[in-house]
Image (tube, helix red, strand yellow):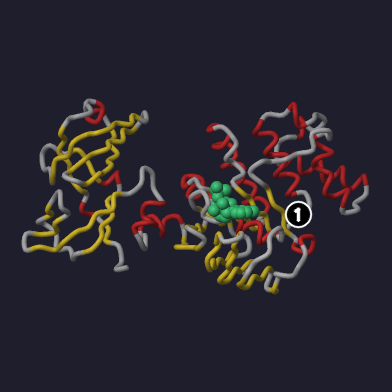
Amino acid sequence: MILELSDIHKSYGRHAALKGLSLSVREGSFTALLGPSSAGKTTTLRIIGGLETVDRGAFSLYGQDALDVPVQGRDLAMVFQTFALYPHLTVAENLGYPLRRAGLSRAETATRVTETAEMLRIAHRIAVKPGQLSGGERQRVAIGRALIRKPRLLLLDEPLTNLDAKLRDEMRVELKRLHRELGITMLFATPDQLEATSMAEQIALIDDGRIIARGTPDDLYEAPRSAKVARMLGSPPANVVAGAATPRGLSLGFATLADAAHPSGQYVIRPNHLRLDPAAPDFRADVVLIEALGDSTVLHLEAGDHALRCVCFGETARTVRIGDEVPLRIDRDHLRALPEP
Ligand SMILES: Nc1ncnc2c1ncn2[C@@H]1O[C@H](COP(=O)(O)OP(=O)(O)OP(=O)(O)O)[C@@H](O)[C@H]1O
């Protein structure tokens, strides 16, 4: 492991930001730290980066205790959400700054600046100042400035949050490419599950100052350990319902599945595993809201006192109106039981 945090506690005054957080990151991996606002993502990265102390817990970097290692000795770089660049310096000077400060010669710095600018596809903008750059270009410079010293570990704190949707898509691909080409270990904090699942090989889910689950995007999506984990991955979020085994089958409150022998417990029904089915419906529900997303339609439904979501594809979904009562079928093959709490 390149990095191990174990049982980290951190409070700001009386507010506990991290409550026993444990996290390990494998060398060369691309790990996402995924969680809602205030979960403790930035605090975790700042501790790793040496910008924050801890109250309690252990932390090792590259196999060695690192709590007392100063920032400069950590061989890592950080990219922040607000990619602050020096406005009075050109792109080349911004990129070269960390190297000049580290004492590299002018010639060596120039070579590395060119190399980095090419890698980040901003070589044609090298002479301009940040004020003349687009948001995406500025972000590339910020990432370039972090990478130019060839750190062993790159920490990224919501680096795509301030970009518009199209640029975010581009930068997602770009970061993946950089990871593949450079083989550098990347730890990436984001509140956006699409970002995490599309880029990372490993996801650590953080909630209220603790890691509540970790695994590959597929592991976490296919076999969530809790309702919270099930809802944190997948968009729109999963339906989680309580099921009771009865002599007539599994009762979900709004539907009874007679054809399957399921034990009582909590069940995850992904919105794409509920479908409009007039021929063999399991239950009927009222449509309370419709989101037309182009190639798919999200129906917000009410069945008894259950609020459910369903993703539909194709023409039939387009004819549905708010207030309609629609017939629905649950895809049996994808009905997942959560493990006992
Ligand atoms: N310097 C500080 N002083 C006081 N409280 C802080 C400080 N930094 C963070 N906190 C609090 O600690 C908790 C965790 O904050 P943190 O910034 O780590 O969350 P986050 O997951 O990065 O959230 P976001 O996605 O909103 O950036 C929050 O409740 C926050 O208000």
Q: Is residue 264 left or right of residue 22?
A: left
Under mark 1, the amino acid is Lys
Image-quadrant location for residue 48: bottom right
What residue do we see at 29% from left, 31% from top?
290
Give the residue at mark 1: 150
Label 1 neighbour load within 10 Å: few <14, some 14-19, many 20+: some
Picture coordinates of residue 101, whole percent (x, y): 87, 50
What residue do we see at 57% from left, 40% from top?
161
Q: Is mark 1 within 8 Å of ligand 1?
A: no
Image-quadrant location for residue 281: top left
Foreground of the two, 169 or 3: 3
Element type where label 1 sits in the image? loop
Picture coordinates of residue 10, whole percent (x, y): 60, 64
What residue do we see at 74% from left, 70% from top?
68
Q: Is residue 23 left or right of residue 114?
A: left
- Judged from this view, the residue extending furthest toward the front is 14
Foreground of the two, 305 or 274: 305
Above or below — where is 202 with respect to 164? below
Any part of residue 303 in sight: yes
- Judged from this view, the residue extending furthest toward the left is 247
Above or below — where is 71 with respect to 195? below
What residue do we see at 58% from left, 68% from top?
8
